[in-house]
């Protein structure tokens, strides 16, 4: 019988350790847990990846369909990100429509990909104004042990890099599939780095028990050239301005480290 | 790309389409205590954005099982009226409204003494009547006043403002056009006494240096808005006080 | 020892009122040695204590308070009463009957029904449970006729006055029974509706001008003027 509630004794322990610069699992304050990445795990999907960040496990599947573009950008493909906190991932996840947590998760990951223009949407136009490719990024959280945002962002990028699209030609207004595959055009590699504020210190990649003790969380997404492309503060507490700027600097470094794990060559 | 040629949003001398300088807030009008049924309420016009906020509570929680044993439950609903935007928006809550409801709640919660009222709920409603950019910030600004108007004990008021990058220049308080046509938007909410950033989001692309500048610019905006909030609250009660002074 | 406002100045939540040695009184809080207002109101300093008289605040139950409430629900063994607080108040049948409640015999709605107004006293209240009421003392029970006035609870002390000076004057001048609930509800019952109207008018004036001096005299004058003019 697992319960996610951390006892008060342990909460104090975690907070005290952190105020002296240590963490319960032995990590440094800015260390990530071990990242295990596997791509191409779902053959039916156009692209997929599974990430284990410590014990947090997230799977992302990419499906590509042909559909109508948005009227204000008729020559661009469409990117849409959705997240499911499936009930089997945690005793706290209930079945039902997406709640505010899964919506926030999807939108933060989406922001990183979209604002960094990671997917070249202008190359996904089939017939201007009429037909474009729609890239569905579906985030599936399989086990929640903290920091779903970073795990989901890593898995999403890995899945996009893994994505193969069918080749096609347009004949008489119909999209006809040709043999062969081409990679989804991905040209940027945004990485989300999430901090928890505990005992007035910034802690990178909080695991579940640290998340229960934290005052607030801050996610900074950095793209390949070191620019910030998304930021999201979450939780009921707050950060000082100095902490915000400190986090941004640390995020840049950590994003580069994570990127090396995902982007090969 | 857009069908029509995009107009320039900022001219060579740094003047924006609405005549403002880069570091200027839009004209702001705030009123407190505008609704008779709500326990507290406030209304803001910031440029063309118009937002109404109302508070009910602290009161019994419905449904009861949501009640927290040691504090009040703060619930927030950010919602846009169908006629608030250019193209009619369906009244059903969108994913964006759900995310904003969450981050706004998290921006205001640190300011309320929720621990004083266990097993109650404080319900906060923000209706965007007209949207022209910066609605989550104006929403927080006016929600904070509604909470104060309701007589709910608070650590401090929360002031919010956005800044961003438009056509290569860093600018304060973006309009909808500037947000859509610009390179970055950073909404920020701030609680002065604790030097606390309670809401911070960013979308777009900024170098680390630009990010630091924009965040500080937004903070300057918040400071000005905080003064306006205080003045508005005091002005409402000063007239009452003056009327009763002999 | 620094204070930052003058007495009776208007302050808003988050305003820094005092530092160091001061004690945080009503509607203020202390953080890191500094005392701030937590509500909109008039600040006042008394010896080493600073407090704020809130201009708007809702009622929080206090054991021993007399309150006026409206029955909103007849439950299995008593009644739920709205006392204009964030919590519903409970009145047990056993309190009214002065013996254990017998469901077969006792018909609760015939004692108090939904919509009835009652004067009661708070006998129990803490953070873990809703306030509990009693009507067993003299003067408590159902209100049968009269008028109800609702004012903001923070002005109730003014309606009572120092050592009851204001409320005694009201009773004398209008000839009415005036029962003041700490929760902001005031019940007025007089020989004629005209007397009651005078009392209500006087209470409204007190609410409007609560923060001024010489109020008792002015209210007395107003009542006499009105009576004279009738």
Image (cartoon, coloured by chain):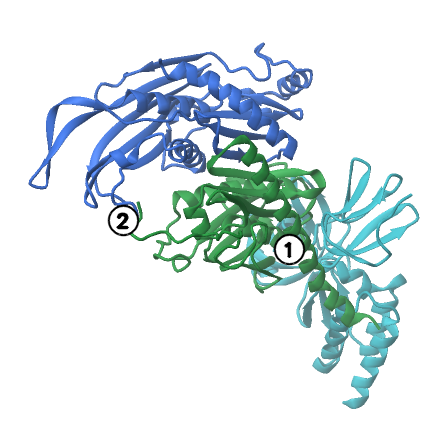
Chain colours: A blue, B green, C cyan
Q: Is residue C198 left or right of residue C70?
A: right
The CA distance from mark 2 to mark 1 is 44 Å
Q: Mark 1 points at which residue?
A: B150
Can see residue C83? Answer: no
Where is residue B71? Give x, y as percent. 63, 39
Q: Which residue is drawn at 74% across and 76% down?
A: C201
Which corner quadrant holds the C terminus of chain B? bottom right
Residue nearest the observer in this picture, A25 or C54: A25
Q: Is residue C133 above or below residue A170?
A: below
Q: In this view, does A143 lie to the left or right of B187?
A: left
Asked where in the image residue A265 lies, by quadrant, the reply is: top left
Residue nearest the observer in this picture, B18 or C25: B18
Where is residue A70? Give x, y as percent. 28, 45
Residue nearest the observer in this picture, C219 or A210: A210
Residue nearest the observer in this picture, C209 or A30: A30
Q: Is residue A15 above or below residue B142?
A: above
The residue positioned farthest toward the left in the image shown: A172
Can see residue C80? Answer: yes
Q: Which of marks 2 and 1 is in front?
A: 2
Total of numbered circles in the picture?
2
Q: Is residue A20 left or right of residue A78?
A: right
| Residue A71 badge | 2
Task: Kindly state the secondary structure of the residue where label 2 is placed.
Answer: loop
Where is residue A42? Give x, y as percent. 26, 19
Which corner quadrant holds the N terminus of chain B? top left
Where is residue C128? Give x, y as percent. 65, 38
For disc 2, the chain is A
Q: Is residue B236 above or below residue A121?
A: below
| Residue C66 badge | none
The residue positioned farthest toward the front in the image shown: B12
Task: Kindly state the secondary structure of the residue where label 1 is placed.
Answer: loop
């Amino acid at each position: 019988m697992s319960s996610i509630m951390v006892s008060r004794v342990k909460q104090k322990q975690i907070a005290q350790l952190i105020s002296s610069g240590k963490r319960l699992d032995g990590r440094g304050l800015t260390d990530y847990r071990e990242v295990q990445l596997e791509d191409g795990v779902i053959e039916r999907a156009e692209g997929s990846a599974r990430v284990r960040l410590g014990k947090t496990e997230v799977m992302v599947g990419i499906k590509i369909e042909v559909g109508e573009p948005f009227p204000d950008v008729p020559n661009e493909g469409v990117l849409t990100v959705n997240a499911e906190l499936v009930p089997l991932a945690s005793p706290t996840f209930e079945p039902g429509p997406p709640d505010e947590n899964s919506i926030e998760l999807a939108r933060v990951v989406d922001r990183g990909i979209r604002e960094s223009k990671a997917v070249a949407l202008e190359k996904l136009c089939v017939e201007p104004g009429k037909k474009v490719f729609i890239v569905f990024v579906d985030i599936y959280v399989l086990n929640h042990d903290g920091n779903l945002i970073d795990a989901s962002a890593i898995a999403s990028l890995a899945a996009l890099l893994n994505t193969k699209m069918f080749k096609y030609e347009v004949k008489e207004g119909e999209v006809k599939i040709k043999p062969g595959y081409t990679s989804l055009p991905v040209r940027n590699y945004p990485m989300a780095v999430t901090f928890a504020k505990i005992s007035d210190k910034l802690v990178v990649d909080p695991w579940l028990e640290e998340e229960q003790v934290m005052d607030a969380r801050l996610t900074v997404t950095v793209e390949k050239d070191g620019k910030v492309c998304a930021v999201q503060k979450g939780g009921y507490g707050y950060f000082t301005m100095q902490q915000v700027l400190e986090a941004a600097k640390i995020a840049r470094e950590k994003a580069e480290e994570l990127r090396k794990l995902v982007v090969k060559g | 790309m857009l069908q029509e040629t995009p107009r320039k949003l900022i001219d060579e001398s740094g003047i924006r389409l609405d005549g403002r300088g880069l570091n200027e807030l839009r004209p702001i009008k705030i009123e407190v205590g505008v609704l008779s049924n709500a326990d507290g309420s406030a209304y803001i016009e910031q440029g063309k954005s118009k937002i109404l906020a109302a508070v009910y509570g602290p009161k019994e929680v419905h449904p009861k099982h949501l009640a927290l044993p040691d504090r009040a439950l703060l619930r927030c609903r950010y919602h846009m009226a169908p006629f608030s935007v250019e193209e009619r928006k369906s009244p059903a809550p969108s994913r964006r409204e759900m995310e904003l409801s969450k981050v706004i709640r998290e921006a205001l919660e640190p300011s309320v003494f929720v621990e004083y009222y266990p097993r109650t709920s404080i319900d906060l409603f923000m209706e965007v009547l007209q949207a022209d950019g910066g609605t989550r910030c104006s929403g927080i600004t006016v929600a904070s006043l509604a909470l104060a108007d309701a007589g709910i004990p608070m650590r401090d008021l929360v002031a919010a403002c956005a800044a961003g990058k438009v056509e290569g220049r860093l600018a304060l308080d973006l309009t909808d056009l500037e947000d859509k046509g610009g390179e970055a938007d950073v909404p920020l909410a701030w609680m002065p006494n604790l030097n606390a950033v309670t809401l911070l989001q960013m979308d777009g692309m900024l170098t680390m240096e630009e990010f630091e500048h924009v965040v500080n610019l937004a903070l300057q905006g918040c400071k000005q808005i905080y003064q306006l909030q205080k003045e508005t609250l005091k002005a409402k009660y000063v007239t009452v006080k003056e009327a009763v002074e002999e | 020892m620094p204070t930052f406002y003058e007495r009776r100045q208007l302050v808003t939540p988050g305003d820094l009122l005092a530092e160091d040695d001061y004690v945080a009184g009503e509607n203020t809080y202390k953080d890191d040695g500094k005392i701030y207002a937590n509500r909109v109101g008039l600040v006042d300093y008394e010896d080493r204590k600073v407090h704020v008289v809130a201009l708007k605040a809702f009622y929080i139950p206090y054991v021993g308070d007399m309150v006026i409430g409206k029955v909103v629900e007849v439950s299995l063994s008593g009644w739920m009463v709205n006392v204009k607080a964030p919590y519903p108040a409970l009145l047990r049948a056993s309190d009214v009957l002065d013996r254990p409640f017998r469901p077969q015999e006792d018909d609760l709605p015939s004692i108090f029904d939904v919509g009835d107004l009652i004067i009661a006293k708070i006998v129990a209240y803490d953070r873990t449970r809703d306030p509990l009421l009693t009507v067993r003392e003299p003067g408590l029970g159902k209100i049968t006729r009269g008028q109800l006035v609702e004012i903001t609870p923070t002005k109730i002390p003014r309606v009572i006055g120092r050592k009851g000076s204001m409320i005694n004057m009201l009773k004398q001048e209008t000839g009415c029974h005036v029962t003041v609930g700490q929760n902001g509800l005031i019940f007025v019952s007089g020989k004629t509706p005209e007397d009651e109207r005078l009392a209500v008018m006087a209470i409204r004036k007190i609410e409007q001008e609560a923060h001024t001096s010489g109020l008792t005299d002015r209210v007395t004058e107003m009542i006499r003027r009105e009576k004279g003019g009738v």
